Image (cartoon, rainbow, N blue to C red):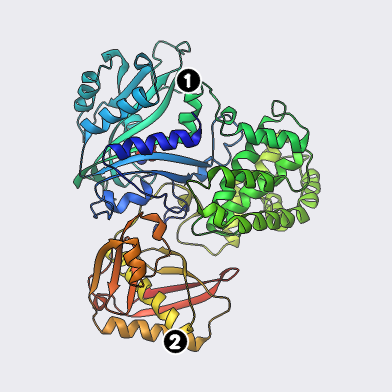
Amino acid sequence: MNRSELIKAYLDFFKSKGHAIIKSASLVPENDPTVLFTTAGMHPLVPYLLGQKHPMGTRLADVQKCIRTTDIEGVGDQRHLTFFEMLGNWSLGDYFKNEAIMWSYEFLIKILKFNPSKLHVTVFEGNKDIPRDEESADIWKKLGVNAEHIHYLPEDDNFWIQGTGIGPCGPCTEMFIDTGLKPCGPNCSPGCKCKKYLEIWNDVFMEYNKTKEGKYEKLKNKNVDTGMGVERALTILSNKDNVYETNLFLPVIKILEDKTGKKYAKFEKSFRVIMDHVRAATFILGDNKPVLPSNKDQGYVLRRLIRRAVRHSRTLGVEKGLLTPIAEHYIKEFKNEYPELAKNETLIITELKKEEEKFLETLEKGLHEFNKLSNKDIIASDAFLLYQSFGFPLEMITELAAEKGIKVDVEGFKKEYAKHQETSKLGSEQKFKGGLADNSTETTKLHTVAHLMLESLNKVLNTSVHQRGSNITPERLRFDFSFDRKMTPEELKKVEDLVNQKIKEGIRVVCKEMSLDDAKKCGARGEFEHKYGEKVKVYLIGEFSKEICGGPHAANTNELGHFKILKEEASSAGVRRIKAVLE
Ligand code: SER
């Protein structure tokens, strides 16, 4: 089974069980300032898991593009990836443990054709707050899973919550395939790190919300959230223990071998880094909300990925031009599920080339400098010099150092870096962990004012202005939009005034569900329309603003307070950024 066949089989299966198939959300989370990228299939669905109604119903399934940046350094071994796809099915207060487990079993055994005797499962053993999950264990038993194949494990293994440790959560049951390898010891079980049992799927029973204070509250609904990593599943299905040797990456290995004349077997690490990083970069550049290389946030992750790939193509003896044929391959391979890649093909290729050229201007000199500095451990100021003057990302410096058997003062580098940065509210490390959408009153109000602002920008600038992204914390709104020059102080004042006028008018905010076609017909703006599939929510603020949006929103504009623009600046080519607050 190849990747497309697996995705199709999964989505068809859940469609036959009454699930609406939704499109993958953007890689850049909306209104979630705690993380840079979408980290799991459930991530864009957090508001719905917390109780909001989803326009497509209570049974959903999808394949979601995800990025986890904590894994950048890990890439090069057999299994770490920064970009991956996650298959998932959800029940939003619809079915619960019984159907979820039954369908997982049916899909694994009947569709993927695993031998039932190879299946092992884990369930939550319970803790002081949440009881032992006997219910799941009983369902597995009824399906015929041998009691010896059901393992009770603690919170660390079988209680799922996002990286931040707050939000919708619950006990989970995970499914493993026994590879037939010898047990690593007397306690060998699916919980251990050895490769005997490979995890294929995770069913989370989300009936709690963990608060900031550490309390478990019952959610309005009992939800199911499942996740199956496509790459992991393909690895298991092809009886491999290495994701890079599945049919997903074999064609890319072939391209690399042809272009470099080097063999994968001899240069595994560089091959893997290039294969993974170019795939992630292709998806970030080719997102529904394209991100360009920069020194900040998502743009900096992208820059680091491209630069590390360029460095490794040099290791393979190719100075230039190795990345784009691989990106072209990925666009072809993935455009069926993610048409935005084809739409953004020119941008992807142009930007990859540009960033490669930019880095090549300093790479040679930087490596020369590194060689001079590397007769001993690298001190913080030298690491910072490599970063600032030659554009070497930190992980590239530590990687080069490791190749020479020396160390880098990473903590010292971070201090040096912080000194030079505008200290942002969230430390960069925090941003790299998991997170969830914040639905506080403050963020909700800022979200509503963003609609008023987008409309006002369109009216004041008298041209078609599109939203290019937004990032909302309880304190402020950051809003990116398409416009190709600096706004004048008069224009900014006019936008402020128009928004404040609409706030004063006390207009009711109304949500209507309709088909995408009807939404378009009624003139609703929608940058994220592809996310919700056929049926969408349109938020109407009187006659003034109509926007396709997931919500949530304030009920009336008179709740919003006084709107103030703090700053208007360039974000990237053709995109401006406004920072604004409600006072
Ligand atoms: N949220 C769970 C995971 O990421 C299941 O989807 O594994």
The amino acid marked with disc number 2 is Lys
Kindly identify the residue that appears in the image at 61 percent across and 47 percent down: 305
Q: Label 1: which residue? A: 194
**Nearer to me, 370 or 228:** 228
| Residue 352 coordinates in the image, percent (x, y) | 66, 54
| Residue 179 coordinates in the image, percent (x, y) | 46, 16
Measured Cα–Cα span from mark 2 to mark 1: 62 Å
- Asked if residue 231 shows in the view, the reply is yes
Split into quadrants, the picture shows ligand 1 in the one at top left
Q: Earlier in the sequence, mark 2 or mark 1?
A: 1
| Residue 421 coordinates in the image, percent (x, y) | 57, 62
Q: Is residue 140 above or below residue 203?
A: above
In the displayed orientation, state which residue is furthest to the bottom: 490
Figure disc tally: 2
Assign the C terminus to one quadrant of the image. Answer: bottom left
Kindly identify the residue that appears in the image at 40 percent across and 50 percent down: 23
Confirm or reject: label 2 Cβ below 8 Å from ligand 1. no
Horizontal relation, residue 317 to residue 532: left or right: right
Q: Is residue 22 above or below residue 581?
A: above
In the picture, the disc for residue 525 is none
Q: Label 2: which residue? A: 493
- Asked if residue 408 shows in the view, the reply is no
Kindly identify the residue that appears in the image at 44 percent across and 11 percent down: 185
Kindly check if marks 2 and 1 are in contact, taking CB atoms under 8 A apart as contact: no
**Nearer to me, 224 or 561:** 224
Judge the density around disc 1: few (<14), some (14-19), many (≥20) Cα neighbours within 10 Å: some
The amino acid marked with disc number 1 is Cys
| Residue 461 coordinates in the image, percent (x, y) | 48, 83
- Locate residue 55: give its quadrant: bottom left
Kindly identify the residue that appears in the image at 76 percent across and 53 percent down: 360
- Locate residue 130: give its quadrant: top left
Query: Which SS class for mark 1?
Result: loop
